[in-house]
Structures are given as structure tokens and as C-alpha cells.
Image: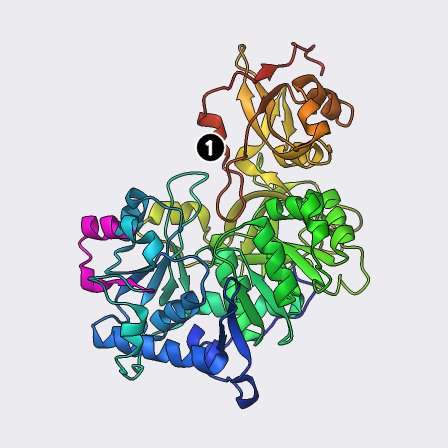
Amino acid sequence: MFSSPYPDVDVPNIGIYDYLFGALAEEDLDRIAVVDGASGAETTYRALRGQIDALAGAVAARGLGVHGVAAVLCPNVPAFAAVFHGLLRAGATVTTINSLYTADEIANQLTDAGAGWLFTVSALLPAAREAAYRTGIPASRLVVLDGADGHPSLGDLLAMGAPAPQVSFDPATHVAVLPYSSGTTGRPKGVMLSHRNLVANVEQARGLLGVVPEDRLLALLPFFHIYGLTVLLNLALRQRARLVTMPRFDLPEFLRIIQEHRCSYLFIAPPVAVALSKHPLVAEYDLGSVHTALSGAAPLDGELGTRLAERLGCRVLQGYGMTELSPVSHLIPRDGGDGRDVPVSSVGYTVPNMQCRLVDPATGEDIPVPAEGTSAPGHLLCRGPNVMLGYLNRPQETADTLDADGFLHTGDIATVRADGVVTIVDRLKELIKYNGYQIAPAELEALLLTHPGIADSAVIGSFDADGQEVPKAFVVRQPGAEGDALDVAGVMDFVAAKVAPFKKVRRVEFIEAVPKSASGKILRRMLKTAEPAVSAVEAPAVPERQ
């Protein structure tokens, strides 16, 4: 078992509202809390707290409280902060819904979560209205934040003037938020995160991330995802920093907002890192205000991280976690580990208050931390105050994920150095087994991204005519001469020259875009179920020794 090299932090046993706003100092009240990146409209901490209290009073007056569940279907706009924390202030449980969901998907989550209210915006109203109708949510409890005929608006609720309620619950057991896992390894499940989980994870991460009140954080990662919810929304508010919201990714708008609002801290996923490190448009903007970029939600290759750092002239960090961990369990600290060699290809150190184990997936035996060098790879298990309560109404899935000792089985393969630096190797269920060898898709994907003619890539296991699992690469060409000239043989030869023979890519398919979740995670199941394209080519058979 190994833990953080950093000392444990005190985790107060209070609700998230009291943690974020209970000690709001007089000198912070008129700081800017949230900025609409598109319009520039600003909300101070004083105004935001007032909106949160007013919304809590309004929904409490209408019967929503400690035993109720409300859903929020909303992109990253300033109102999200007021609605989310207003609902928590009233004692309700909030289930956050992916803004890209169809009416069917919204209805499924509403039903599974037992939501009686739905908060959305007019742009998403058609799907929201259909889902609400199917699940019995009346028009009076379908709130359209920016207004729509027949539904209450955020302004209507704030104007009620009802006082914030006095609520009582146990922060350690009361479910604050109910996000749903990505579903890349099965049907989406409601992840029960308590107030204490949320408070603990901000406390665990904030010392390592080093966000200060003068920082301006670009809020691109969706708040409905736990990464954006904890590491952006809650952590920024705790540190009295400024959040600049962006509802969807558009590279020119992303660059404009950084330049115009002088954003200093970027929280991104690897696809954005690829664009920032490769796209020629980046050179047309002044990004000198950026001092740090943190990548999470999917593996970031070390070479890509280095290129990004060189191009932006900033520090690049990587973190690791999952929804079930609220989500952060590992981080490269902003101070770089006080001079220690912490490669950007790693996920840094275990955060305070956590214990971890590596377990051999074949034998179940613990893998020891070496006295020097790096351990053998093993299944990463984590335990700490940020670990979820369990999956909603899914006792068997909960038991399969949380063991009797309180360790959460992440499903990821990792190594640990003697000094505690952790590197994620791959997903346990995504390893490709070829002729008895294990191949990590993430390794091949990172290598493919170093080719100047490749804009993006994904690798899966694909079965050949003999039933043998072989690596198949899905490749997005980089626009321009090199990308246009790239062919199947070129991809295969590039990889073959840089890896052991058994790791060769043996099938290639060119596609327009790699399917990914909102957090940037490759949706391999979509690639595995897709019909082969005419550009898919299989490599010639090779001797078994390769």
C-alpha cells in the first residue's frame, strides 16, 4: 500500500454550500466569481451567493428539499453555478445530465435517478420537454433558465424572495450529486457522491493545484461532468478565483476568450491539447497570460504534453481520477514536485488522505512499491474520503467495485515509482492480447499522434479471420500536404519502426473524427460496433514469433 508524499488535510464535516460560501470574507464579496466568456457579463461572489440563497428559498417553498432529486441539463453558463449550488443549498440531490443527450437518454436518467424537477435552457428545451413529459415532470417543475412560455424561468424563481431554508442532513451520507458514469464499459450508472466527498476532493486537490484568487480559469470542461464540477466549478469558487465559462468547444472562440479575458489556468482534455499543440491558428492569438494547463479525463502522452508546454510557454500538468472518486486521486503538483522529476506522461502523486494498492490482475497478489525504479504494472485500487458511497440502486455493481476494505477498483492498470509517482498504463479491459502479449492501446495512440500527418487516433483490438486479436488503428488525417499523402502503409510503417514486433498496428481505418465523450474519453465501443469502412486495410499475415 502507498499513499501521498504530502501530509493529510483536514476535511470539515459540513455541506458543500457552507464549505464554499460559509466563510466568504468581506474582501472577497466584490471579486468576480463567474464571467460569461461570450458576452463578458460578470457575476460577483456577493451576487452569486445571493442568487444561490434565493433559488434555494424558491424551490424549498415549492416543496423541493432534502428528500428530492432535481436534474440539471445545462451547458457551461454562469447560471449553472447558481442553480447547482442553490439546489444543494436547499438539501436536494442534483443529477447532472450531458447536454448532448437525446430525449430518450434524458428520460432514462431522469427515471433512474428519480428526478422530480428538471432545469434546462431554451436551446435544449425540445428534448428536455419530451423527456419530462415521458417521466411525469409537469411544466411547472421544468424550469427554463433563460425563459420559455409555459415554464418558470430562473428570473421567476429568484424574484419570489423566499428565504433560504434551514436544512439538516449528514454530510457524510447525504447524496449531494448523482452524476452518471460514462457508460464506456457498460450501462451508465448513477454515482452517489456525498457532500463530504465533494468537500474532501476540493481539499485534497487545491494545495497541489495552486489556484489563487488572481487566477482566471477557462471553464470549457462541462460542469455536468465531475471533472468540470469539482476541479473547475467548486475548486475555483473555494479559491475565490474567476471562472470564465464557455458552453462548447470552438477553437477560434476558445483562443479569443483566452486572449480577451487573460485566462491564466487552462483545464483541458487531450483532444484540446492536440489542437493547441498542432493547429496553425494558435499562433495568431496572444496566449501569454497562460501559466498552467492541466489535462485530465483521458491519458495525455508525454511528448504531446512537452510540445504543448513549449508552444504555450506554460507548465503542463496531468491528473487522474474517475467519477467514482469525485474525481481526483492523482495529480502532478503545480510546483512540479519541488524539483523532483515528475514527467508529464505520469499522473503525479496520490493526493492527500488516500491510500492506493497495485494488484496483479492475473494472481490477485499485491505488487510491492520498489526500493528504486518502477514497479511492475498492476490494477490500481484507491481508498479515501473522496470514494463514492456506491451506485444508485445497483448493489451488485457496487460490491464489484468497492471491496470490503473500502478500496475502489478503478479498472486501470498503473505503475508506481519508488518515490510515489504513478503512471497509468491502460484500462484493464482495453488491453489487447496478441499471441500472449499484452498491448496497451494508449501507447500506440500516443505514438501515432507524434506523426505530423495525423491529427487524432484511436486503437482497439480487432479480431482477424483466424480469431486472433490484433491492434487496429483509426486515424484522422492532419489537413495539409503530409496528412493528405498519408496512406495505410505509411501508418503501419511508422508504427513498426518504433515498437516491438508484437505491437505493430495490423489494421488501419481512416475516419473523419474519433468518437469521444464530453470529457474527451475515447468511446471505443462505438469504434468496435461501427461497420468497417472501405479504407480499412489489414496488414499481411506475420509469423507467430512477431
State how many labels appear.
Answer: 1
Q: Quadrant of the N terminus?
A: bottom right
Dot 1 falls on a residue whose secondary structure is helix
State whether residue 69 is above or below residue 492: below
Q: Residue at 53% x, 10% y: name it.
A: 465
x and y, in percent, of residue 538 in the image: 60, 14
Residue 353 seen anywhere in this rendered image of the structure: no
x and y, in percent, of residue 299 in the image: 62, 44
Residue 87 seen anywhere in this rendered image of the structure: yes
Q: Is residue 173 within the magenta segment? A: no
x and y, in percent, of residue 101 in the image: 36, 46
Residue indicated by mark 1:
525
State whether residue 205 is above or below residue 491: below
Give the magenta-colored segment's residue range: 128-146
Q: Nearest the camera: 486 or 445?
A: 486
Q: Residue at 34% x, 49% y: name it.
A: 395
Residue type of the residue flagged with mark 1:
Arg
Q: Nearest the camera: 60 or 194?
A: 60
Q: Residue furthest bottom?
A: 26
Q: Is residue 498 left or right of residue 460?
A: right
Query: Based on the displayed image, in which of its 4 quarters is residue 511 positioned?
Result: top right
Query: Based on the displayed image, in which of its 4 quarters is residue 195 positioned?
Result: bottom left
Q: Quadrant of the C terminus?
A: top right
State whether residue 389 is above or below residue 360: below
Q: Residue at 57% x, 72% y: name it.
A: 242
Residue density around tag 1, few if under 14, some if 14–19, many if 20 or more, within 10 Å: some
Q: Is residue 153 left or right of residue 252?
A: left
Instruction: Specify the color scheme.
Output: rainbow
Q: Is residue 274 left or right of residue 24?
A: right
x and y, in percent, of residue 315 in the image: 74, 58
